[in-house]
């Protein structure tokens, strides 16, 4: 998803806390998850992780963020990568937020999870679409994509969804051709284990033009990223500029654009995701809002 900032890999097993009631103090959630991530990290890394998580649950802190059910109904969605972001300037209904909440790194025979460490602020009631970023490009330890790696990724998707009332998760995985069967198997496993989760996938623009393989996936949303497109970028941009759509019909409900690149004059997509290479501000949001096609 554009210029990515890497996190150090932290491997841990995960235990899910599901208390019966929601704590309504939205800012407390934000502070706990984004300003004190070491509590969550260490509580799960320790051998007695269930005990540590039990303490958190006993304190009444549900490991979830306040989310509205309309997380997929906003027309504008702002991607928030792994860096400090203050999005508290957004008013209700201006835009949803799609923060990277965890990175899953597949390398060799292992899968490691790194939960978000950078602070993020947003107003109470903000609409949140959590993003899981998948890294599978280790040149020295090419991932074998075994059963254990599939289980870790599947478990992470289900765990993240369980923390958000809307149960919507976006996957950001630029799967190579040799990794697509693995990706499909993960999606199928998620569907079999939890039929209530709604899935959104980011997609390379080429997957919606010539290298089409997404049409059989059972997901609710596909978001083609029409930026940082490389050598085919000019051809894809020219085609989209003429028609406002992509050849693959499954890729036309949503679109991803960058604040520092070309912006089409019109789009057929109902939802527009925006990537910024720099932290969002009120000024940058207002400026890009004026450029976003109607």
Image (spheres, grey):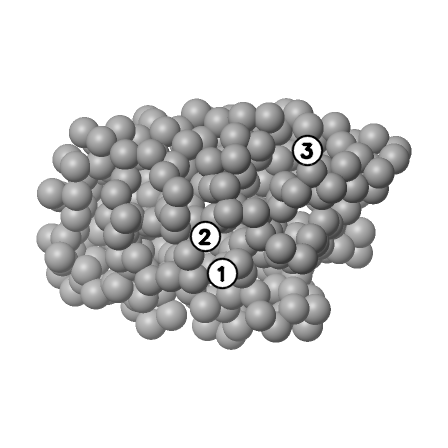
On screen, residue 21 above or below 103: below
Disc 2 vs disc 3: Cβ atoms closer than 8 Å?
A: no
Q: Of the numbered discs in the image, which one, if any, rests on residue 166?
A: 1
Image quadrant in which the N terminus is located: top left
Q: CA distance from mark 2 to mark 1?
A: 7 Å
Q: Which residue is mark 3?
A: 40
Residue marked by disc 2: 67
Query: Spatial distance from mark 1 to mark 3, Cα to Cα?
Result: 22 Å
Mark 2 or 3, nearer chain start: 3
Q: Tags 2 and 1 in contact by the CB under 8 Å rule? A: yes
User: SS at mark 2?
Assistant: loop
Position in image of residue 202 (x %, y %): 44, 53
The residue located at (39%, 48%) in the rendering is 125
Image mark for residue 270: none
Q: Secondary structure at mark 1?
A: loop
- Contact between marks 1 and 3 (CB within 8 A): the answer is no
Upstream in the sequence, badge 1 or badge 3?
3
Residue 145 drawn above or below residue 220: above
Residue at 68% across, 33% down: 40
Q: Relative to the observer, which residue lies in front, 135 or 9?
A: 9
Residue 75: percent from the left, percent from the top?
26, 57
Neighbourhood count class around disc 3 (C-alpha, 10 Å): few under 14, some 14–19, many 20 upward: some
């Amino acid at each position: 998803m554009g210029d990515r900032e890497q996190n150090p890999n932290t491997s841990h097993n995960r235990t899910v806390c599901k208390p019966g009631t929601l704590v309504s103090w939205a800012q407390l959630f934000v502070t706990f998850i984004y300003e004190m991530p070491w509590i969550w990290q260490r509580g799960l890394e320790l051998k007695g992780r269930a005990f540590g998580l039990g303490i958190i649950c006993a304190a009444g802190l549900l490991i979830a963020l306040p989310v509205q059910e309309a997380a997929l109904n906003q027309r504008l969605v702002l991607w928030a990568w792994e860096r400090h972001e203050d999005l508290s300037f957004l008013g209700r209904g201006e835009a949803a937020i799609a923060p990277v909440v965890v990175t899953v790194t597949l390398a060799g025979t292992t899968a490691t999870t790194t939960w978000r460490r950078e602070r993020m602020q947003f107003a109470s009631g903000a609409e949140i679409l959590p993003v899981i970023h998948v890294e599978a490009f280790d040149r020295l330890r090419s991932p074998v994509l075994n059963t254990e790696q599939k289980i870790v990724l599947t478990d992470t998707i289900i765990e993240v969804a369980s923390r958000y009332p809307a149960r919507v998760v976006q996957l950001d995985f630029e799967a190579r051709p040799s990794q697509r069967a693995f990706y499909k198997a993960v999606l199928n496993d998620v569907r079999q284990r939890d039929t209530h989760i709604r899935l959104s996938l980011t997609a390379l623009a080429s997957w919606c033009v010539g290298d089409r393989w997404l049409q059989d996936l059972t997901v609710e949303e596909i978001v083609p990223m029409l930026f940082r497109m490389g050598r085919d970028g000019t051809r894809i941009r020219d085609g989209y500029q003429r028609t406002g759509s992509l050849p693959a019909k499954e890729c036309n409900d949503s679109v991803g654009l960058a604040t520092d690149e070309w912006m089409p004059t019109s789009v057929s997509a109902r939802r527009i995701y925006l990537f910024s290479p720099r932290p969002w501000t009120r000024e940058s949001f207002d400026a890009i809002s004026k450029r976003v096609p109607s």
